Amino acid sequence: MIKTFRESFSLLGTRRFGTFWFASLLSSIGTWAQQVAEPWLLLTLGASSFLIGLDSFAMNAPVWLLTLAGGALADRSDRRLVITLFQSIQMLCPTAIVVLLVAGLVQPWMIIALSVVVGVTDALSMPSFQSIVPSIVTHEQIGQGLALNSTQFNLSRILGPAIAGVLMSGVGVIACFVVSAASYVPFVGVALWILPRWTPAAPRADAPPQSHLFAGIGDILRQRHLRGALLTVLATGTLCAPLVTFTPVLVKTVFQGGAGHFSAALVAFGVGGLLGAAGLLSIPPGVDRRRLTSGFALAHGAVLVLTALSPWFWGLPPLLVLAGAAMTVSNTAANSLLQATANPRLLGRTVSLYMLAMRGGISLGALLTGAAVSLLGVQHALLLDGVAALVIQAALARTWFRAALPDPGTMI
């Protein structure tokens, strides 16, 4: 176990992966600083719980329409240029919010509209981004690379909200959007400098005349082990991810907390995610990722139920630590299974389906839970989500484990 852990971290010493990892960390810190500031800004502007859910929906819903196109781009275009183009456009969104705040013109609908732009650019570029790790590590290192990538993402979930809490208390929310805009610069530079140029594979002469967008999707979904991973991630995103989305509502309306309490809650979620990612680094490659995915998805549902029933604020951070660990292990294990067993010619589209399940689930869950919060209150809405997650994940696990896996020698 210790040897596996050391081998995983040795990847950070390589030129390509190490540079990519650190640039991604800086970018993610900026993103999370904005993720803390944005719902709090909406609340201070008088936005309702439904509008906060709508903002999250606007940011994640475009994956339903565009992520398959993003997968096709990842398989058929130079991924460096795809990432550079759409990340540059995305950088303009926090910049626009800074300008609106300085001018005193910001309104909730403007923030939501800019979230749509972020969602569109994410949907088109994320399959290319998610396909980077397999292109800069060996096949045997894919699981370790993805776990390390998850580590930086969850480390940013600690650093980003912590920085945001300090900035919001000392300077104001505008500083978080400045940090977010600046954080794009190093990542765009690394995408052009360090990532390998991608040469798409030529189409086979016997390939059927299918739509470019949906070509190969049926082949992916017909494989039960891949379909099971995708459905599990979809259920987690729809039913469990709203816990993070509505944490500001829980903190402000139920526990009467402020921006510092909200920041502390998100830091706790990031700590859990970091612990989960670190734990994955010590798991040998041959371990069945299905059991990790389903087991921790069930644990996430149980934590959601306990969170909804918690009567005091200081019970929230420890539960969010558990929630962050459960979500990270479940989703990263599913992603590892998908990327290690997918047809290399369809890797971009396989990743796009993963993003569709994860981000699409988050958007759907935000919208539905936002409506439920307005009708039932935030605690009752989250309790309903948690119970549904336990039932659905248990049913998925029973059918998924009956599927035959590919040759273990090809798995991570």
Image (cartoon, rainbow, N blue to C red):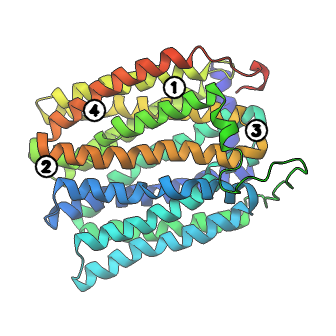
The circle drawn on residue 293 is 1
First in sequence, mark 3 or 2: give its number.
2
**Image point (51%, 60%), residue name:** 122
- Splitting the image into 4 quarters, where does residue 308 fall? top left
User: Can you say which quadrant of the picture contains the C terminus?
Assistant: top right
The disc labelled 4 sits on which kind of residue?
Asp
Give coordinates of residue 246: x percent, y percent.
24, 46
Per the model, the C-alpha gap separating discs 1 and 3 is 21 Å
The circle drawn on residue 343 is 3
> Which mark lies nearer to you, 4 or 1?
4
Q: Check whether the beta carbons of the residues at disc 1 and disc 3 lie within 8 A of each other.
A: no
Q: Check whether the beta carbons of the residues at disc 1 and disc 2 lie within 8 A of each other.
A: no
List the residue tagged with mark 4. Answer: 385
List the residue tagged with mark 2. Answer: 252
The disc labelled 1 sits on which kind of residue?
Thr
The disc labelled 3 sits on which kind of residue?
Asn
**Picture layout, residue 144 above or below residue 77:** above
Left or right: 285, with 106 as reference point: right
